[in-house]
Every structure is written in structure tokens, then in C-alpha cells.
Image (cartoon, helix red, strand yellow):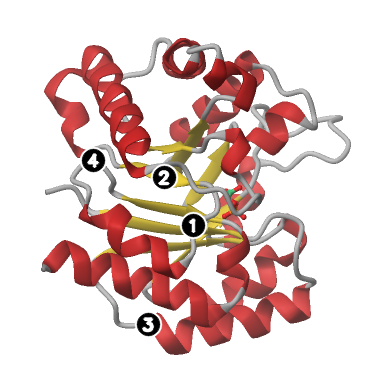
Amino acid sequence: MRRLALIGNWKMYTTPSSARFLAEDILNRLNGVKEADIVVCPPSTSLVSVADIVNGSDIVLGAQNVHWEREGAFTGEISIDALVEIGCRYVIVGHSERRHIFGESDEVVAKRLRRALESGLKGILCVGEKEDERQRGETEKVISRQMDTALEGLKRTELIVAYEPVWAIGTGRRAEIRDVEAVHRFIRKRLSERFGKDASGNPVIYGGSVMPDDMAELAACEEVDGALVGGASLSAESFASIVTRAIERRIA
Ligand code: PGA
């Protein structure tokens, strides 16, 4: 069975001091939990303060962005060497807020992913359709395009795919479990077409308005290997509850 991954995406919330406080609270609740990969992704300005708290523990650090060049004149961007030095082990790419608010193309997402993977970080590739695309029946077409560009030329790799329907992010409208299941099955099929049987170890996780009460139902679905959690990861109590419920359900 694939390992569970529960990932907190803190987006542009927290300052270095409040992030430290949140990380300490999460660590107190979840350190010692070995049944899942537990990852927190603070904003870049809080990475160092969170690293001080979690590095060496069972909570793993992830970043929300990385540039594809090692260094250079790229104002506002984040270098891989900085992330590695801080102790990041994961990086999110292709989040819908990057794609749709900041206009990142599939090609830019692919370059960021490649750099992360080449440097030994695990990539969390977000894919997902907008509401009008779902209504037009284009969900699989959109996800195929996003995945094909991001994975072009890659060998089997340390990759998590997060299915995040854009209309479910931050809206309180979680996708129906049967739709999640169908899309996850489709993503897994695309992964195996590309990587063969090696892809069987790549987790496919769901994101979009995940709350503690949703987690048991999600984790009970064989196709769901965890969650990418935004809002509910900003409270240590609810994030810990999501982690615990996912594990309990998987073990049951
Ligand atoms: P949400 O965000 O849980 O607040 O909907 C999920 C995400 O954007 O990764």
C-alpha cells in the first residue's frame, strides 16, 4: 500500500514568529507519528524559523515555490540551494493560485518541477480543472495537458500528484467522493502510462476545502493517498486531527 501524505500549505499566512508558534504546536501533537509523511509548507519568509523547530523531527519541511535556475537576476524568486540549505525536502509546484493568479504556464510549472527533482527534493505537482472546465466535461483533458507537460521527459521520480479542483480550493465546497475517486484513478492511469509499474508508489492526494470531518471518508477511498490542506492546516488542532483521522481510517 502507498504511504499516506498529509501536507499543510500555509500559503501567504504567518510571519516568522507566528509560524514558529504554529510549528511548535504541530510538533507537540504529531512528533512520533510514523504512519504517514507529514509535511508543512510555510511561506518562504517563515521557512527558516519553521526549520529550527521541525528539522530532525517527524514533521518535514516543504516550500511553496522554487526557481529553475540555480541563481541569477530573478527578483522575488527562490533558489534551490537556499531551500536545500534550510532543510526543505518537498516543494509545491503548479498550485492553482500560481497558475491562475500569477499566470504560470504549464511550461513554467514543468521547469520548476524538473529543478526540484534534479536537486533531490520531492515534487508536489498540483493539477485540477476550473469550474467551467468541469461543466464542459473537460476535466480529464485539462489534467492530461497539465501532467503531460510537467512530466515530459522525466524518469520515474519522487513525485506526489495533488488533485485540486480549482473551484474547491478555499471555498468550503469539497468535491464529491465519487468524482475524487474517478479523477484519482485517471491520474494513476496517466502515471502508469508514463512510468510503468514504478508509478505504483507515487501518492495521489486530494486538496480543496479538506476539513477534519472529511478525512475519514477521503482516506477510506483506496485511490486517495492523503491530502493537501490549506485553511485547515493553519490550526494545529485541525491539522493534527486530519492526520490522525487519515491514519486511523487507513489502518482500520
Ligand atoms: P484549502 O486549500 O484547503 O484552503 O481549500 C487547499 C490548497 O490550496 O492547497
Q: State the mark number for residue 223.
A: 4
Residue 17 in the image: state x and y as whole percent. Answer: 76, 81
SS under mark 4: loop
**What residue is drawn where x is 58% and y is 17%?**
133
Q: Is mark 1 within 8 Å of ligand 1?
A: yes
Q: Are marks 2 and 1 in contact (CB under 8 Å)?
A: yes
Q: Give the residue type at disc 1.
A: Val
Which residue has dot 2 on it? 206
Q: Are marks 3 and 4 in contact (CB under 8 Å)?
A: no
Q: Are marks 1 and 4 in contact (CB under 8 Å)?
A: no
Which residue has dot 3 on it? 31
Dot 2, crowdedness within 10 Å: few (<14), some or many (≥20)? many
Residue 1 in the image: state x and y as whole percent. Answer: 11, 49
Q: Give the residue type at disc 2.
A: Tyr
Inter-mark Cα distance, 2 to 3 = 23 Å
Which residue has dot 1 on it? 210
The residue nearer to you, when weighing 22 against 245, is: 245
Q: Earlier in the sequence, mark 4 or mark 2?
A: 2
Q: Are marks 4 and 2 in contact (CB under 8 Å)?
A: no
Inter-mark Cα distance, 1 to 3 = 22 Å
Dot 4, crowdedness within 10 Å: few (<14), some or many (≥20)? many
SS under mark 2: strand
- Establish if 208 lies above or below 31: above
**What residue is drawn where x is 45% and y is 31%?**
118
Dot 3, crowdedness within 10 Å: few (<14), some or many (≥20)? some
Inter-mark Cα distance, 1 to 4 = 16 Å
Q: Earlier in the sequence, mark 1 or mark 4?
A: 1
- Establish if 42 lies above or below 99: below
SS under mark 1: loop
